Image: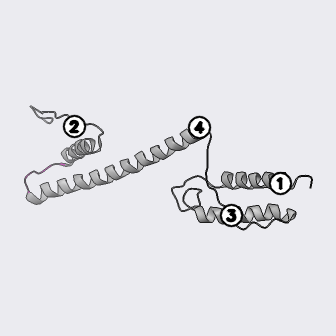
Amino acid sequence: MDSYAQYVSMQSEAAVRHLTSSCPYDTEDESISLRRNVDDVSRALQAKLQERLARAGVEVVEARLSHLAYAPETAGAMLRRRQAAAIIAARQQIVKDAAGMVEMALDRLEEYQKLTLDEERKAAMVSNLLVVLCSDHAAQPVVNAGTLYT
C-alpha cells in the first residue's frame, strides 16, 4: 500500500457513500432512515468501515455521520416531498373529520325529527357540507330563493 492515509480516506468515503445511498434520508414507515435511526446507521457504518479497513490493520472503534449535505436540487426535491406528504396527511385528517361532522349532522337532524330528507337531498347536503368543511377558502353562502324540485 503506497499511501496508508489515502487508502483509509478512500475506503471511508466509499463506505459512507454506500450507506447513504442504501438508506433513505427519511421514511414514512418503520424502515431505517438516516435521520430517524442514528444509532442503527452508526452501527452499520462502523461495520462497513471495519470490513473495508481490516485489510489495512485498522480497528474502527466508532463511526458516526455528523453532517449530511445534499446538492441544492436534491435538498429542494426532498423538502418539496416532505411538504407534499404533510399536506396530504393534513387533507386526510380534514376529510376524516369532515365526514364525521356530516354524519353527526345527519344523525342529529333525524334524531330531533326537525327535518326529513329524501336520499337525493341528503346527498346534496352531504356534498355541500363536505365542500364547505374541506375547502381551503371561506364558504360563500348561496341563498336559494326557490326550490330545486318541482
- Residues at marks 2 and 3 touching, judged by CB atoms closer than 8 Å: no
Point out the tag, 2 or 1, that comes first from the N-terminus. Answer: 1
Asked if 23 appears above or below 78 in the picture, the reply is: below
Tell me what residue is drawn at x 86 percent, y 63 percent.
Answer: 55
Residue for badge 2: 139
Q: Amino acid at mark 4?
A: Pro
Give the quarter of the figure containing the C terminus.
top left
Q: Nearer the viewer, residue 42 or 25?
A: 42
Tell me what residue is drawn at x 68 percent, y 62 percent.
Answer: 63
Q: Secondary structure at mark 1?
A: helix
Tell me what residue is drawn at x 72 percent, y 53 percent.
Answer: 18
Q: Amino acid at mark 2?
A: Ala
Residue span colored magenta? 113-118
Q: Secondary structure at mark 3?
A: helix
- Quarter of the image holding residue 135? top left
- Quarter of the image holding residue 110? bottom left
Residue for badge 1: 5
Q: CA distance from mark 2 to mark 3?
A: 53 Å
Location of residue 140 in the rendering, given as x and y in whole percent from the top left corner: 20, 34
Point out the tag, 3 or 4, that comes first from the N-terminus. Answer: 3
Q: Nearer the viewer, mark 2 or mark 1?
A: 1
* Label 2 crowd bin: few (<14), some (14–19), many (20+), radius 10 Å: few
Location of residue 120 in the rendering, given as x and y in whole percent from the top left corner: 21, 45
Q: Secondary structure at mark 2?
A: loop
Residue 61's tag is none
Q: CA distance from mark 1 to mark 4?
A: 30 Å
